[in-house]
Each structure stands twice: as C-alpha cells, then as structure tokens.
Image (cartoon, rainbow, N blue to C red):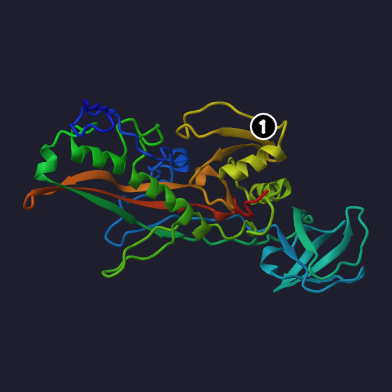
Amino acid sequence: MATVRTPYTDPTIQRRVISEMIGLLDWTVAPLLKRLWMSGEDKFDFVNWPPGASKKIEWLEDSMSPLTDALNGSVNASQTSFVVDNGSYFHAGHVVEAESELVIVDSVSNNTLTVIRAQGGTTAATHADNVVLTIRSIAQRTGANYTIGNTTLMTAPYNYVQTLEESIRVNDDQMKAKDYGVEDTMAYHLAKLIGGSKGIGTKGKAGQLTLLLANMAYYGKRQAPSDSVAGMAGGLSTYITTNLAGDTSTALTRAAIETQLRAIYTAGGAPDLIDCSPWAATKINSFYEGFVEVPRSEDTGGGTIKYINTPVGQVEVMIDWMAPPTKLHILDTDKCGWVTVDPFGVRKFEPQGYYTVNSVKGEYSFVVQNEKAHAIITHSATL
C-alpha cells in the first residue's frame, strides 16, 4: 500500500511562511511626558545649567501675604480685642470681615488686634473660636502714620538628577546574522530602549527607558546621591502636599474635583489639566455629560483628549494608561515638568572578547513649582 504523505506528518523541512514585521507588544504612548515634554529647563528659567557634581537643582518660590486668618478664642458683640492665630498678617487700617460684620484694625500687638466694630453699616455680632477673618481692604484715616505690612520669604524647593541607563550586549555571530524582521540586531534592541526616529508618543515609537522616565512623575521619590547611593528624582507626590483629598475607599465625585479646582484657583494657580486613568476618565465623562468637548490633537501622542467646562474655566482631561488607577492629578502645566540634564544618547564601547556592547544613558529631573497650584485626589477605582 502506498504511503500517503501530508504536510502534517512529513518530516521533511518545509519553507516557513513568516512576516518580516515583528509584532511587539508595546505600550506606545507616554501621554504626560509628551504633554509636559522633557526640556523644561527653559520654561523654569534655570541659570548655571546644567547642575554640577551635586546633581541638585533648585528653584525659587514666593507667595503673597495671606489674606485670611482665624480667631483664637470667641468674642462677643462688645469686645474690641480679637486674638488671632497670626497677628503678623494684619496692620492698622485693614478692613476685616468676620462672618457678616466688618471691623477696621486700629492697632496690632503680637497676636491681638484692637478693632473698631460694626463698620460700613454692619452689625456687631458674637463670633466663635476659629471663625475665619478675611482682609477685604485697607481704609486709612486722614493724617494716619504709615503702616508696615507683612512680607514673605522666598523658599528654594529642590530635586535631584536621576540617571537612567541600560546596555545591550550582542555577540559577534548574532551581529552577522540575518534574522527575519531584523536587519541589525544591535539597532533593533537600542530602538526598543529609546524609541524610533519619529519621536516620543508616536505609535510604536516609545522606548522602554522613555516609559520608565515617564513613571518619574507618578512614582518618583527624592533621594540625595552619594558614593554608595544612587540619586533619585521626586515626582508629583513629593511636592504636592496641600491640596490632597480622598483615599482609596472614597468614591470619585464631581464635587471633589471642583473643590480642588477652586482651591488651586484661590491660591493663585491656573489649573488646565486633569491627568487620570481610563477608569477615572469614564467617571468624569458621566459627571460632565453635556459639558465635554472632544477635539483631536497630537499633543499627547494619540491619547484621547477632552475638555470639561468647570466653575474655574475649561480644563483638559487627559487619559494616561500609566497613571496610578486610584489617583487623579490636577495640574497647572506651566508649573511642572521634566528637565533634561543630559539627553538619552548611545555610547559605543570598544569590542570586548567576541561581543559588542552599546549603552543608552540619560539624566533627568522633575520640577513642581508652587505646589498649591496642583492637587491630587485619591479615590477608589470601582464603580
């Protein structure tokens, strides 16, 4: 009986049908990195750039004198002395609002204000401990002596430079090999580290080191370098300490978002970006149904961009698959971003034995100016 051979049983080596295009499972976008970009040293106006051996960068911040304080103890309707938490905020002539009553400060001694009650047609009233006092204006009497107001001191927040480096080693035989889909083994693997020629965020072009750099914003922890310890750059959570809300058991709400937007706006910030996970974006869509615009843009490398209309103006909502699923960041993008100390580059080492080594290295840091211009809302990631 004749032997019937089939393609499934014949042991003869057969021609392989193989695509020259390698299907690489690769998250191809780094939206926040693309949105804020990596070269913020000009935006932040650094001098004496780049930093020296200390690998430390600093920026100067200042603020206006506070316009609010609180009573430190209750007062009745006839008292002319208000004890406050910080008397240095006030001076003679300040028009101060306590609930519905206006008073004018006559003099200040440490934390005690001597005041003239019931000004401007208002009525003297009892005010409880911790009632907020708001400086509304200044009204000096004719011939009054000059007054010295409160001044603030500059601060110098800082961060450290972080080095990202990875090397590729290819032996001589592999360098000469002609593999399917790969003309140059070394070049192929280097491209996987730093991305292709069309830039960060372009489909298929975000390299592994680029993605790890993007993680700096979300997971970076500041650490000073030494001979035995690598320096690390702090991210958003290192600096944003005032406008924090929620926890991982708290549902994300529209009220929570708008409360933080107002807090930023009141502090003098200009929030223009909500950076969040796909789940949080779905929730925001439901909160603002009918108040969403969806123009197309290349600014985030293909990420979906929406704009919502809020009480403080139009704010962009950007989906970032890299964002922590339980954190939503509200940012003033003029006041945060990456800075480049030494851009990613390839260093070619002399051949060692029967292999070749190339290294990709870059040095970067992260800046968050005026932390009250930003907010972080922690929330649960369940419906």
Residue 296, image x, y percentages:
54, 26
Q: Is residue 150 above or below residue 203?
A: below
Residue 172, image x, y percentages:
9, 44
Residue 246, image x, y percentages:
66, 58
At x 61%, y 59%, the residue is 242
Q: Nearer the viewer, residue 328 or 105?
A: 328
* Residue at the spot of label 1: 292
Q: Quadrant of residue 176?
A: top left
Asked whether residue 270 is in view, the answer is: no
Residue 67, image x, y percentages:
70, 57
Q: Is residue 2 above or below residue 259?
A: above
Asked whether residue 181 is in view, the answer is: yes
Secondary structure under tag 1 reads strand
Amino acid identity at mark 1: Val
In this rendering, position of residue 294 left or right of residue 193: right
Q: Nearer the viewer, residue 105 or 354?
A: 354
In this rendering, position of residue 28 left or right of residue 118: left
Mark 1 Cα-neighbour bin, 10 Å: few <14, some 14–19, many ≥20: many
